[in-house]
Amino acid sequence: MCFEWLFRPDTLWSSGFRGSVGAVENKEEFWIHPPRYGRYRILELGPFPHIKLPAVPGGTWGWAVYPQAADYADLAWANWKDTLRVKFRYTLGSTVQLATPLGNLPCHRVQGTGTSRLGTTALEAYFHPAYGFVRLNYCNIDGSRVQLEMATVDMRPESTGKILEQVFWRPSNPQPPK
């Protein structure tokens, strides 16, 4: 699965306004890779937006990532050699009503920490069952903060149908799936 981050012109970097990232969405979990280009490379050390499903308040889980220095180290905020291990720990809080550009939404509040030999990072994330993560509040390795918020939703079921048709329709089956 692939998601696309779109950015305002005031956050422009050399590669443009867009960045595509991978994600996992199934009945057991949902996670999305945060943006990781230009000024957003620092988010590689923060907890990725992640929730275990079904969402049960008080639940905890963890995992780790291994960012490469060649891709993510930056003297401005963190420097290391080779590979860095970052351990993520998450706790699911209660459901809260969150005012967003999409309206007032009931969201699961997820608290995450990222720990490495360089220090600790934090994420407060808000997950809506239909839209995914609608707000991400990061505290980065250097103490800086980044807030990302879903501003619009663009679902294209006609694209999904075309993809399924390409993947599942075979010449032996003269009719595409309905």
Image (cartoon, helix red, strand yellow):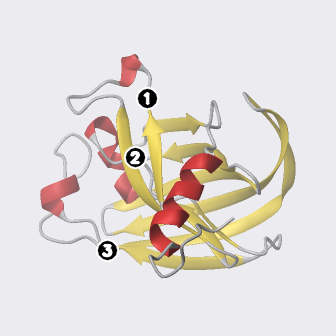
Identify the disc placed on residue 35: 2
Give the mark toward the camera: 3 or 2.
2
Instruction: In this rendered view, identify the residue nearer to me: 2 or 65.
Output: 2
Type of residue at label 3?
A: Arg
Percent position of residue 96, x then y? 86, 49
Q: Secondary structure at mark 3?
A: loop
Q: Secondary structure at mark 2?
A: loop
Q: Secondary structure at mark 1?
A: loop
Callout 2: 10 Å neighbours few (<14), some, many (20+)? many
State the separation of the CA atoms marked 1 and 2. Answer: 10 Å
Q: Could you tell which of marks 1 and 2 lies nearer the N-terminus? A: 1
Q: Residue at x 75, y 76 (%)?
A: 59
Give the mark toward the camera: 3 or 1.
1
Marks 3 and 1 in Cβ contact (< 8 Å) = no
Q: Which residue is mark 1?
A: 7
Q: Residue at x 12, y 66 (%)?
A: 81
Type of residue at label 1?
A: Phe
Callout 3: 10 Å neighbours few (<14), some, many (20+)? some
125 in relation to 51, above or below: above
Q: Which residue is mark 3?
A: 85
- Horizontal side of residue 19 vs 105, given as left or right: left
Type of residue at label 2?
A: Pro
Marks 1 and 2 in Cβ contact (< 8 Å) = yes
Determine the image quadrant of residue 39: top left
Instruction: In this rendered view, identify the residue nearer to me: 136 or 17.
Output: 17
Percent position of residue 55, x then y? 79, 70
